[in-house]
Image: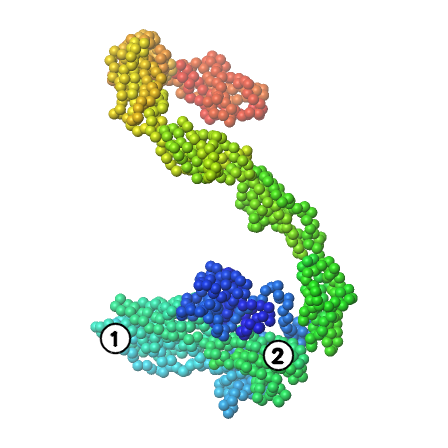
Amino acid sequence: MLSSTAGDGEIEAYESDLVSVDSPDEYGFMINQLQWQDPQHRRWYTSAHQQSPDYWINEGDGTSLVNMENAFLPEQDPTFNKDYLAYSFSNKLNRWGFEKVKGDELLLFICEVPVATLRYMVVDDRTYQYGVDIDNPEKIPRGPYFIKQPHDVVFDLSKKTITNDVSLSCLAGGYPTPTYNWFKEDYENDRLVAKQIDPLSDRRYTLSGGTFIIFDPKQIEDRGTYHCKASNKFGTIVSESVQLSFGYIGVFNLKRSPENGNQNWGKTVYCDPPQHFPGVKYYWARDYFPNFVEEDKRVFVSFDGALYFSALEHIDKGNYSCNVQSKVSDQGQNGPFFTLNVNPHSNYQQLKFPNNFPKAFPEAPVAGEEVRLDPPPSYNWTKRDGNLPRGAVLSKYNRVLVLPQVQVEDQGEYVCRAANDRSAIVNSVVLSIQAEPNFTIPLVDRHMDNKADLTWTCEAFGIPDVNYSWLRNGELIEVDRLPDQDRDRYHIVDNVLTIRFLDPERDQAMYQCRARNQLKTRYSSAQLRPSFKKHPLEGETYAAEGGNITILCNPEAAPKPKFLWKKDGNVIGSGGRRRILENGNLIISPVSRDDEGVYSCNAQNMHGFDESHGRLIVLQGPRFIQQMIPRIVTSVQQNIELRCQAMSEELLDVAYIWTHNGLRIKDSDLFHTRVNIDGGILDIQNTTFAEAGDYECIIKSAVGRIATRTSVIVQGPPGPPGAVQVDDVGRTSASIQWTDGASNGRPIYMYTISGRTNWNSTWANISETMELELNRYSGRKKANLENSLSPWSTYEFRVSACNQLGCGQPSAPSPQFNTLTDRPYKAPSKIGGGGGKIGDLTITWEPLKPQDQNAPGIYYKIFWRRTEKDTEFQTLALKEYGNVNKFVVRIQQEWFFTQYDVKVQAVNDVGYGPESEIFTIYSAEDMPQVAPTQVSARSFNSTALNVSWLPIEQTREKIHGRLIGHRLKYWKKDNAEETAVYYLSRSTQPWALVVGLQPDTYYYVKAMAYNSAGEGPESERFLERTFRKAPQKPPSSVHIFPVDPSTVRVVWRYVAPSLEEEPLIGYKVRVWAYDQDMSTANDTIVYVGSKLEAYINNLSFGKTYNMRLLAFSNGGDGRMSSPAVTFKMGES
């Protein structure tokens, strides 16, 4: 809560302390409260104390300020001995923050009360409803209070012929319903006097409720200040004072002299408006009305009514008129037109502001009004020592800065910078904000005891500062003019009114606190004024066994009664577990089952007594039926189920909460679907090491909380070893050391060592070992790898450990190291050869992979000899060729297509590797030396010939190699042989089919044999003709008739061949399933001479088929009928 008085005694009286702020959320909450409750921007102590440089402790609760550096305001002065913190407002930054203070200054403070001690606080919050037994809140007796205050009124004299009356209104609540009186304020002998308005004294006046109506208002008689009073039997209150004024606009002068200005110089043309009240709006017209002057970067109409030109030009010459309109009505006046002359001038005027610019409109704004700042190029507005207020609007080419609903924080110096391409100037205006009084601590109704003391405090904010005075029933309280018996009881100090020894006959009334400055006067009003009927004891009160309970005893009684408590009819006193507070409340702490029963509270004062009864029911907290065992051991990938069950009062709901290592497990977690909660059952699927730890099942009800815990130990494969190092590196061996990782519950019995090299980045297992050396001082393990590595390689290793539950993750890779070089261990593989031109012996092999070369400088040595002819190998070292995979040895041409024995050996800088096995290959072939004989050709169809010959004897002497196939050469009879086309048949059979020929045409054909060296000599030519064309017309009138469930009959019309076609041989009926391709079709053949019909058998019942029909001859298959006929078996 916010307090405006200082003192440790007052804080301790409420068992509270200065506020402790230890998080950004609490800091922001306090900022919001200060912005709402303290528009004066005062400073407020907190409990923060600096223990060491930049280390702050809240003495209230012992917490520290962490991550709150941005909450501190910049330091303006040296901070020596400033070890305390206060909330302060920075006008420069326009925000609240922490300021370091010495702690010996008299400042306001903020205190906080622990929630646990709130029940001990005794607060008198009795209002006008106290002691009144009325259900309807609108009929509860209370003094008057204003619902609607009156407002200033301006009567428009120009509308007097239309509306010739004016009204002032106020509205008040209260019961009995208040009556109203209106007063006009005036000065008599320099003293402000309020004269009551009597409607009977002037027939123009009418009072209707809180409305005061003046008919035919007179400007001289009726203008002035008014207020109303509302009264009932409890007293009288006074409203705020309002002004009744009369609005008017006079008439412009009929003529106006011309204005003159120089070209390229600035010019100000003043409006010279007529007399008016209140303010007016200005409009400038040119040449005729309403041709209003358009504003641009040169031309500007200010809120002071003047027309400003930054630099006159010839186009500005013309006739101008200033026009005004009242701000409170639609009445206006048009000014006379006058001429603006622009005289030529050779020079430019230096950039400068007009007199009194920039300006503020209004000059002294009130908080909440709209403010406009004008200057007379380009323009830019800034605020000195700060930023422009939020919501600020720039208009009229940035010349006008508008501050809507200006706040106190917006006051300061505003700077306008005007610039053109030759110079720039700066000027400023100081904006001072005024604020009408606004109550931050208003009065509240009080119900006091007889002979008690009353202290009333009100507080209002305003600029200029506020003066306070107090009224009683609408009359100013002046202590020195009070009766003698009251003079010593009333004490007024500014905004604090104290009345001692209250007397119901003299002090019961309506009181008002009046806050006034030069802008406004504001009022805050309040009323000054035993039974259990409104607040009886609760019929049933529930308490938790072992907890605390407060049974409220809240009768309405004045003066304050004495309290007596009974349990089951027996008087109980204050002591032990039971405490009776000053306000009558009974506290039991802790509660036991014996406290259950009927309690009665008896309240008694000088006017009588009353009693109220209620039952206290003590509820037990939840009790376990099933608890978790203290320790559970499982392994990874297993399922575990944790259970806890409890019983509780049927009246109460029970909630199950599960935690893992102190963190709550959510009931539904989309990211951890393996963990499911069903009340008191926690099910974990496919357990991992992450699920190990302490689990707690918490069972809560409204009156208690119990918990059971278990530790879940998850065993599994070992963790990855660490610190893998390599020693004693040789050509194919090394020693590896490491430190074991976590065993995860089971002993390690084996290790797997994997490695990778610079030649292959894939990890490969090198060794699985159980024979280790153990360093008993360091606990590190050591394994020796023998004959497992490749020479001349860069290795890195990793180790994984295994136990009965499997092998764990491998370790991080070891540092890289290089093995020594050595001769090759492998011979080249995939030895082969053959091919090439005659005289070549081509030997091929697969080079050694980099990981098998074992040293730099790899090359190969080849060996060759004729099979079964030579005994010794010829050799050749290919050192200058490097890591090749083929070499061609030149041999005598007579040894074409001859078998050779070959082998290959790898060599590096260290030495020779093993020789490969012996492989037999052939030397290069020579072209065949014989041609096919008895070549003949026969017509196949209209576009193909079948060519045949006698087979060639496939011997080395004739073929000079291995026969691959035949090459056919063909050309038309009437064409030259040079136009021949070649057809390649990769077959050793003595025939070939030449296709793609033209029908009924004679062709010459020749045949040749070929091997890998090329083709042999050509045969004799042979002449043959292709058949005439196949049938060019499809069968027509195709019809299908069902015969039985598996047979159909097909009929068609005859196809007559032309002279260019071969005679018909017959017809083909082609049928295939509807859901398959035509390549699966079956043909039924009907030869010429038979009936033009066909029976298609063995069809499936209920299946759909497609059918097409064609004629065929020696020329081939003809065109098929189209489209395909679709039919379904089993349908007519």
The span from disc 1 to disc 2 (Cα, nearest Å) is 75 Å
Residue topped by disc 2? 454
Q: Is residue 907 above or below residue 729?
A: above
Q: Is residue 468 above or below residue 770?
A: below
Observer able to see residue 48:
yes
Residue found at x 48% / y 74%? 105
Instruction: Indicate the amino acid at tag 2.
Output: Leu
Observer able to see residue 329:
no
Q: Is residue 345 above or below residue 543?
A: below
Which of 361/1075 is in front? 361
Tag shown at residue 887: none
Q: Position of residue 457 (x, y in %)?
A: 57, 77
Residue topped by disc 1? 262
Q: Is residue 932 above or below residue 855?
A: above
Which of 701/469 is in front? 701
Q: Position of residue 315 (x, y in %)?
A: 28, 70
Q: Earlier in the sequence, mark 1 or mark 2?
A: 1
Crowding near the residue tagged with mark 2, few <14, some 14–19, many ≥20 C-alpha atoms within 10 Å: some
